[in-house]
Amino acid sequence: MMTMWSPRAQSGRVDLQKKLVLTSHELEILAAAVSGYSYNEIAQKLSISEADVDEELAKVSRKLGVEGRLELALYAIHHRLLADRQS
């Protein structure tokens, strides 16, 4: 599966096979989750609520067709969604 920078979303990624876009905000939250931060730590880091973190990760999971934080992290790593990011 090929990914590349999306011209439709500033600093986002597009999965060409699934034709979906992850925004830079979604990628930031995903990167923090993959790095092992808790929902509370992510919320504090980004100045948002834990409910917002949960909602954003659920939205990303739906977009990618995965369930649970582990499957989401494995998908992100396997498909190099965060290859150009530093967290």
Image: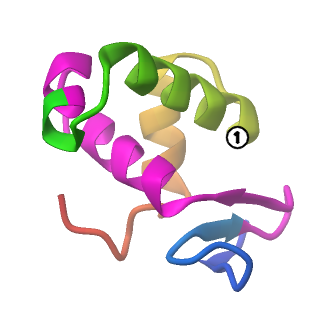
Of the 4 image quadrants, the one containing the N terminus is bottom right
Q: Is 35 situated left or right of 57 in this image?
A: left
Q: Which residues are magenta?
A: 15-43
Q: Quadrant of residue 34?
A: top left
Mark 1 Cα-neighbour bin, 10 Å: few <14, some 14–19, many ≥20: some
Magenta-span inclusion, residue 19 = yes
Is residue 32 found inside the magenta-colored segment of the image?
yes
**Front in this rendered view, residue 1 or 19:** 19
| Residue at (61, 37) in percent of width and height | 60
Query: Label 1 is placed on what type of residue?
Result: Leu
Question: Could you say which quadrant of the image residue 85 lies in?
Answer: bottom left
Q: Is residue 55 left or right of residue 27?
A: right
Name the residue carrying label 1. 64
Q: Residue at point 62% right, 18% down?
A: 67
Tell me the colour scheme of the image.
Answer: rainbow
Residue 9: horizontal and vertical position, in percent?
Answer: 65, 72
